[in-house]
Amino acid sequence: MNRFRFSRSGASNAHQAPNATPVDEPRPPIEPVRPVVARSSVPPTAHDADRDERDLIEVVQSKLIDETDTSGRREPEYYARRIAELVTEHLDRSGRVVSERERMRLIRLAQSELLGLGPLEPLLADDTISEIMVNGPYQIWVERNGKLQETDARFIDEDHVRRIIDRIISPLGRRCDETTPMVDARLPDGSRVNAIIPPLALNGSTITIRKFSRVPLTAADLVARGAASPELMELLRACVLGRLNCIISGGTGTGKTTMLNVLSSFIPDDERIITIENAAELQLQQRHVVTLESRPANIEGRGEVTLRDLVVNALRMRPDRIIVGECRAGEALDMLQAMNTGHDGSMTTLHANSPRDALRRMETMVMMAGMDLPLRAIREQIASAIHVIIQLERLQDGSRKIVQVCEVTGMENDVVSLSDLFVFQQQGVRDGRVVGRIVPTGIRPRFLEKLQQMNITLSPQVFGNVIPGVR
């Protein structure tokens, strides 16, 4: 009946050497042995979980389960209040004298273990943390301001980590076990979750959570943080309103999804937007938004729905804009065809280190669609479909900035030509912080004529001090 066990008889044996069983005794049935190689697989003595706290949680849990069996399920708020009452009752009966601060800590601990994500709850509530990395049960790291820090938080054992993973993915109808040891998921607030378990993860079950701001960042926030300039944000806003197709490029953790959220905030409220993602994490504020999410195959290997399937289906849903969270494979071809067939103003992200690399990666992904297209035909589609490439980068001090904005100007010979509109100029490092700013190159983009036809004007200061009418 007890769904959340904190120990089991075989838990300690799982970490013993294979020859620990006496030769003259019958061996127990063979079970999968979780590999033990990493430092995090040995629990540090200083962080051993307090047995009294475990007993308290087990008592409260047992009473909650009994009450649920007799009275049925209730709202989470009821269980939070009931846990606080049961913890107080248990402390009173045990005669244990604790301060009010300690009592509240025990209540929060019990609520986190029974209703939340255990030791991850305080980290999720900390707005200064942007990423949480669980390397096995005894090692949890976080990212603050672009820098990694190890925390004092710990899980009890490997089974404790597995329970938390199940609690994250069960509401989404996904599974993570020895047959499918990797899973992508999301938290209710949109934070992205990846989990991988033994035998693939030798350190023990590993969880990576990419947190997102409770309040979505705006263009003004990016300017205030130095990630962009006011002139650049004015240009990007005009590009979105002018229905130009935009590609956001960058490495891992550079802020591509955040930038996609900011750009999508410029889309007018009277347009129908369809978002397509592997794990829904975009935070669009418009009312007319349809969110589609891919689905992995079931245990029988059936029922998979890929991003490419969703992009093809979205074309039949009368979209004004199609936003793909990230292009990774053959869906790039369908995305380019959508951009070239009347679905202007679409946006997506991809992993690349520069705008030129982004074009090469786009070519590679189109080839992954399985179509035997000539390279020149692929490049012509790219040159025709994509108007603007925005390059992001995480600098050495951990800050994330827009470092380059390029216009795709067409084809020259057999090469897609690019024109830099804004570039980041680094001026040095002061007190560990990168000093620099993104500045216009003075080149006026060719798409200005299209913006003017849509009655969208830009101030001359956006492109720097240049002579009017001269490129």
Image (cartoon, grey):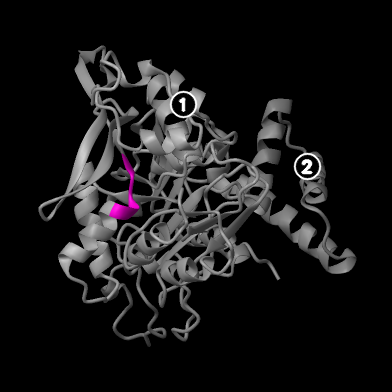
Amino acid type indicated by mark 1:
Thr
Residue at label 2? 84
Looking at the picture, tell me which residue is in the foreground, 91 or 32.
32
Q: Is residue 440 visible?
A: yes
Which residue: 59% across, 70% down? 173
Q: Quadrant of the C terminus?
A: top left
Q: The N terminus appears in which quarter of the rendering?
A: bottom right
What range of the chain is rendered magenta?
384-389
Left or right of residue 283, residue 152 in this image: left
Number of residues whose C-alpha sits closer than 10 Å to that of mark 1, classed few (under 14), some (14–19) or many (20 or more): few
Q: Nearer the viewer, residue 350 or 458?
A: 458
Q: Can you tell which mark lies on residue 284? A: none
> Which of pointers 1 and 2 lies earlier in the amino acid sequence?
2
Please give the residue where the numbered disc 1 appears in the rendered image. 457
Tell whether 290 sits left or right of 98.
Answer: left
Q: Is residue 387 magenta?
A: yes
